[in-house]
Each structure stands twice: as C-alpha cells, then as structure tokens.
Image: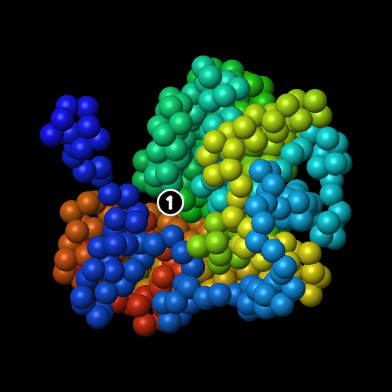
Amino acid sequence: MVDGSLSAKISSAPSDPIFGIVEAFRADPRPEKINLAAGVYMEENGVTPILASVREAERRLLANSTTKLYKPIGGDPALVKLMRALIFREPGAPFGTLPPIATSGRVEVLHTPGGTGAVRLAVELVARLRPEAQIWVSDPTWPNHPQIADAVGVRHRSHPWTTANVRELDMGALLEAIAAAAPGDAFIFHGACHNPTGIDPTAAQWSEIANAAAARGVLPILDFAYQGLGDGLIEDAASLRAFLATGCEVLVAASASKNFALYDERVGALAIVAADPAAAAAILTHAKVAIRAAWSNPPGHGGEIVAEILGDDALRAQWEGEVTAMRERINGNRRAFVDALAQAGAGDFSHLLSGRGMFSLLGLSDAQLAQLRDEQAIYLVARGRINFAGLSAAKIPIVAKAVAALLR
C-alpha cells in the first residue's frame, strides 16, 4: 500500500453507541427479543406508525405537487414560518399568534435536515462566531452532542446533570458549571424530555438556570428533540420561555422526527434569537454559508408534510391529538413498568414516575446489560436507558422480572 493513501494504516471506527445496539438487535434471531434501545416511538405491536395526519398530508401533496425543485438554502419558507409559530407559541395563544420576541426582528429560523442538522448548524455557528468558546454538555447526554462538537472542532466539557443516584437533578452542580464557564461559552440543554435520564428542571428551576446563564454571558443551545412528549407542545417549551425572559441570545434546535413520527424524512429547524435585528440578519448570513458547504438545501418532502399539517386547522388538530395519544401511552407504560418492578421485587423505582418523555435510566452496569442481552434478548443502551415506548402490556412484566433478577 502506498504511504499516504486513504487505506494506509486504516482501522475501523467504533460503532455508534445507539445504532450499534439496534443493529445487534436486528441480527438477533431469537423471536422473543425486545428492543428498548432505539430512540423511536412504537405502538403496542412494536411498529413505529405513520400518523394519520401525515398520511392525509401526503395524499394532498401527491395530488397537488408540481415540482421537485431545490428548496432555498434556508429552507421551505412555509415550513420556516410555521415552525416559528410552533416553537414560540405561548400558553393560551392561538396557533400562529406570535409573541413580541418572535416578530421583533431578533429571530431567524432555518429549515434543517432533522434535529441533528439543527444541532450541527448551531455548533457550526459557535465555531465561526465564538472560536474560543467551549461547549458544555450534560453528563449523561445524547452521545451525538459531544460527537458533533468533535466533528466541528469545538472543545467540549461535561457537567453533572443528576445526583449520584441518578434520581433527581443536581441543580447545585449545574449552577456551579455555569459559574465556572467563560463568558461566550455555550451550553447544550435538552429543552424537554432529557435524553437519557428523563429528568427535567421545573419551571422555577429553568428560570434560575436561565438567569444564571444570562448573568454569566453563556449561550444556551436548546435541543428540542421531543417537544410534546413530556407535558405538552406548549408546556414543553417552558425552558425556552425562561431564557427568552432574560433577553439573552438563544439557539433552538427543533426536530419533527419524534412528534410527527417523520424519522426518515429528516425535518428540523434552527431558531436563532440574536441580540438585535442587525445581529440576527448577520448571523443568518453565516448560517447560510455553513449550510451551503454542508447539505446546501434541505430535503423537501418531509418539510412539506409538516407545513401541510401545521398550516391546516383540521389537520393540525388531528396531529395534536396524535401527539397527545403518544405522550399518554408513554406515560402509561412508565407507570405500569414502575408497578411491575415493585411487584417483581426490584426495589423502589418510584423516582421514575417524575420522569418526562420516552427515557429513563435504570442504573445498570455494562455487565448487567450484556447479561440481559445474552440471556433474555432484552436490549437497552448505556447505563440502562430504557425506552418506555418500546414496552407493551405483554413485555412489561417480562422486562421487570428480568431487571429484578439482576438486582437481587
């Protein structure tokens, strides 16, 4: 092999910590296998459905679409307008009625390929506009957060998110991290439904976090991957409203993968809340330069689906009902699993009841997770992250008994 070739001295990269386990699950021939690792919503039968509102939107698009031209660099204008309405909607306000901040000129919104694309663009902006900044992520966090920082070339640090027993938010440690950060550093916060712990700050705690961040001069990046699956579409944006109340700059990475079940369509948005309209316009130009050198133009079909739903009162109401049904099923499984753990003699897991969203941590070791996979064909990811949407009435007692057996 010629020195300097692409294949010289090459070794394999590690598999993705989540998708690698999902691939192992798919390769497992055992019919009784249970997938609690994938970060997707599933129905009782284990299928991730196409929402009825999505089917109707696609039917209309198929009948009326006339072109597949590129979208603008900043994305589908209709989607951008409607995602602005979804992200910034306030309690009691009709959809489309925007708060003053959203019409002040301080806000720009761009259509991105999924929430991952939105987070990547946010980190790219930090690298371009604050090259000395570090990005702080919670420990634990979604594994892609530090990986994105590494890919962009931005230094990152972690801060504790929970107490040592992983049962509640370590507010003191979080505030200490904010105080220790340099002005200009960025913090990636899970806007709602923390992945993987399910432990979210209260509204009062979000206000305290936001005030501390504003006083220190750090930039909050809110990752809204699960809006609507915690307490509700509007309720889950309490974190954003807390930061907006301080007047600080904010970046919001929104995803339509989970709440629209549009996983493979890659629909997301990045909302930029700048210091003033001139800064917002300038940041937008940098964002478009970064986009042009990355995906150039966002994929169109998924964005058109979301725009069709959000732009039609009846379809939007149907979709909101479907989001409510998904959230209630997740919460019901969470409660049933805690009850089943108690009945199986696993001990007190009542702290899981205060969790929000699809995930919580069971606190299992790598050895225990391997034992679950090898002996019971039950798949979870690091630290025993469980996806409650992957459970069913039949699976709940099976998993609870298997976990209880590990802990005895």
Residue furthest out toward the front:
2
Image point (21%, 65%), residue name: 373
Quarter holding residue 18 = bottom left
Which of 40/153 is in front? 153
Image point (55%, 61%), residue name: 265
Q: Is residue 119 left or right of residue 239?
A: left
As helix, strand or loop, the secondary structure at mark 1 comes to loop
From the image, which quarter does the N terminus lie in? top left
Residue furthest out toward the left:
1
Image point (79%, 69%), residue name: 312
Q: Is residue 328 above or below residue 211?
A: below
Q: Is residue 209 above or below residue 318?
A: above
Residue 366 x, y percent position in the rendering = 22, 51
Residue 222 x, y percent position in the rendering = 60, 41
From the image, which quarter does the C terminus lie in? bottom left
What colour scheme does the image use?
Answer: rainbow
Q: Which residue is mark 1?
A: 196
Q: Is residue 314 left or right of residue 346?
A: right
Q: Is residue 180 above or below residue 331?
A: above
Image point (40%, 38%), residue name: 147
Whether residue 94 can be seen here: yes
Label 1 crowd (10 A; few <14 / some 14-19 / many >=20): many
Q: Is residue 123 left or right of residue 24?
A: right
Whether residue 163 can be seen here: no
Q: Amino acid at mark 1?
A: Pro
Quarter holding residue 240 = top right
Residue 374 x, y percent position in the rendering = 16, 66
